[in-house]
Each structure stands twice: as structure tokens, then as C-alpha cells.
Image (cartoon, rainbow, N blue to C red):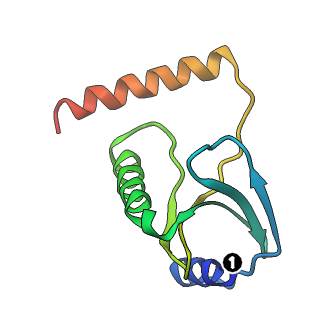
Amino acid sequence: MWQIIAEHISSELDIEFQVEQKTTLSGSTVNIAHLISGNGYQFFVKLNQRERLDQFENEQWSLQKLAQYSSVRVPKVICCGQTLDKAFLVLEYLPIQSESPQGWGQLGQQLAEMHERSRFT
């Protein structure tokens, strides 16, 4: 499975990527999340059953639209696909930063700007 995902990443980014390390991340009750790394790159990977590919395709579309029309920083979608038994979504890895009142204020401002823009598109 990881070889197939690495091949998708390599093809999409036109790089040589091999999974050298993977860490299972906590926080999701719907998908299994991993941080994978290799060749100096890091990616966030979401896995679910193969039949759930449409969920990831919808998320891919939504993230691409948010990135296009929003000032909120969203991870870049790398690729989406299936292995023999899993569906996957690979995203740019954005490390979580510590919370702060300034960070929450900035996020609120960005969300307000996004909603203001969406009223006119």
C-alpha cells in the first residue's frame, strides 16, 4: 500500500519519493491519519476503506476551492486514489502550531474575509 501511495506522490510532484518513516496520528474517529516522510519531504495521509474514495474526492475538491477563494491557510492537495483495499488522500503536511489569542484572532479575521468574498462570487 505505501509503495503505491509513494508512486502517486512521485508522479504528481515529479520527484523521487520513498516512504522512509511513518507515524500514526491521533485525533480522527473516521479516518486513519499518518505522517509519512522520506527524501526530505513530509506528507499527511488519510486512509479509509476503498469504498470511501468519494469522501476523499469531495474533500480534495473542497480544499482546492478553499485555497483558491480563501485567505485561510489550507494544506495543498497532493493526490487522491486507491490501493487494493484502501482509499487515500495525501496532503501537504502543516505542523500544528501552539494556540494563542493572536492566532485565534487571525483565524477569525481570515474566516470573516473568506465569507465576505464568497458573498460576491
Along the horizontal axis of the image, is 14 left or right of 22?
A: left
Q: Is residue 71 above or below residue 104?
A: below
Along the horizontal axis of the image, is 2 left or right of 76?
A: right
**Residue farthest toward the left in the current orientation of the protein:** 120
Q: Secondary structure at mark 1?
A: helix
Q: Is residue 12 above or below residue 98?
A: below
Question: In this rendering, does residue 46 appear at all?
Answer: yes
Q: Position of residue 63 (x, y in %)?
A: 42, 51
- Residue at 68 percent across and 84 percent down: it is 3
Taking depth in this image into account, of 62 and 29 the one nearest to the observer is 29
Taking depth in this image into account, of 10 and 45 the one nearest to the observer is 45
Residue under label 1: 2
Quadrant of the image occupied by residue 120: top left
For the C terminus, the image quarter is top left
Taking depth in this image into account, of 100 and 82 the one nearest to the observer is 82
- Residue at 73 percent across and 45 percent down: it is 26
Q: Residues within 10 Å of mark 1 (few under 14, many from 20)?
A: few
| Amino acid on which disc 1 is placed | Trp
Quadrant of the image occupied by residue 117: top left
- Residue at 44 percent across and 28 percent down: it is 110
Q: Position of residue 80 (x, y in %)?
A: 48, 69
- Residue at 33 percent across and 44 percent down: it is 69
For the N terminus, the image quarter is bottom right
